[in-house]
Amino acid sequence: MEGSNVPVLRGRARLAGAALVVLQLLALAAPAAAAPIPVAEDRVDGSLTFRWNPDTAKFTPVLSSILIERGDRVTFYADARSKAEAEVGKRLVGRLSLTLNGRRRVRYSGIFTFEVKSAGEVSYHATKEASFTLRAVRGPRKKVVRFPFDLPNRGKYDVDGRFVATP
C-alpha cells in the first residue's frame, strides 16, 4: 500500500504510551514533592512503664504499649533506656521516636517535652527545641529526640511525651 499511514500511527501510539507512563510517574511522585505538612501539636501514640533502682542501676521494663491509628501520618512513641555504665545523672535516656508512615513529608518545628511520672506525680520533666522534616525519599524517615536523665528514688515510672509547634 502506497502512502499508508500505519507506521506513522504506530509511532504516534508509542509516543502517546510513553507520555502516559511519564504522567503516571509524575502523579505518583507528586505527594513526595509537595510541601511538607507542618505539625501544630502531637502526643505519643504509645508509652512505657518501667521499674528503676538507683542503688543498683537496675532498669526493668514492665509494660509497653503503642496505639495504631489508621491514617496517622507519624508514629510517635516515648520510651526510656538504661545506661548503667554512665555517670550518675545520665544513667537513663528518654527517647521520643517519630516515624513517618506515609509518603508525604511532615515538618516538626517546635518544642518536644519528655516527662516521667510516678504515681501521677512528675519525677522528671524536660523540654528540647528541635526542627526537622521526616521524608519518605532522600532523607530521614525516622527521628529520635533524646533526653539523658536520672531518677534518685526507687519505684515504678511511666514515660510520656508531646510536641507543640513554635511560631
Image (cartoon, rainbow, N blue to C red):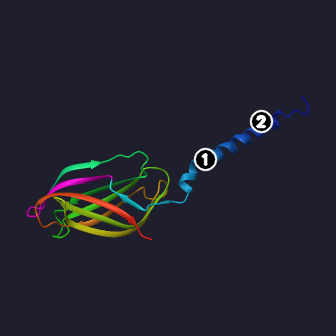
* Residue 12 location (% of width, % of height): 77, 40
x, y (%) of residue 165?
Answer: 41, 66
- The answer to whether 12 appears left or right of 94 in the picture is right
- Quadrant position of residue 3: top right
Amino acid type of the residue that numbered disc 2 sits on in the rendered structure: Arg
**Residue pointed to by mark 2:** 10
Magenta segment main secondary structure: strand
Up/down of 8 relative to 164, above or below: above
Furthest residue in direction right, as rendered = 2
Distance from disc 1 to disc 2, alpha carbons, whole Å, reads: 23 Å
Report the side of 29 relative to 1 (left or right): left
Name the residue rendered at 57%, 51% in the picture. Answer: 29
Q: Quadrant of the N terminus?
A: top right
Rendering coords of residue 15 (x, y %): 73, 42
Q: Secondary structure at mark 1?
A: helix
Q: Quadrant of residue 147?
A: bottom left
Look at mark 1 in the image and give the residue it sits on: 25
Judged left or right of residue 11, residue 111 is: left
Q: Find out whether residue 55 is within the magenta segment.
A: yes
On the image, the x and y values in percent for residue 139 come to: 46, 59
The structure residue drawn at horizontal position 8% and vertical position 64%, both measured from the top left corner, is 55
Relative to 25, residue 157 above or below: below
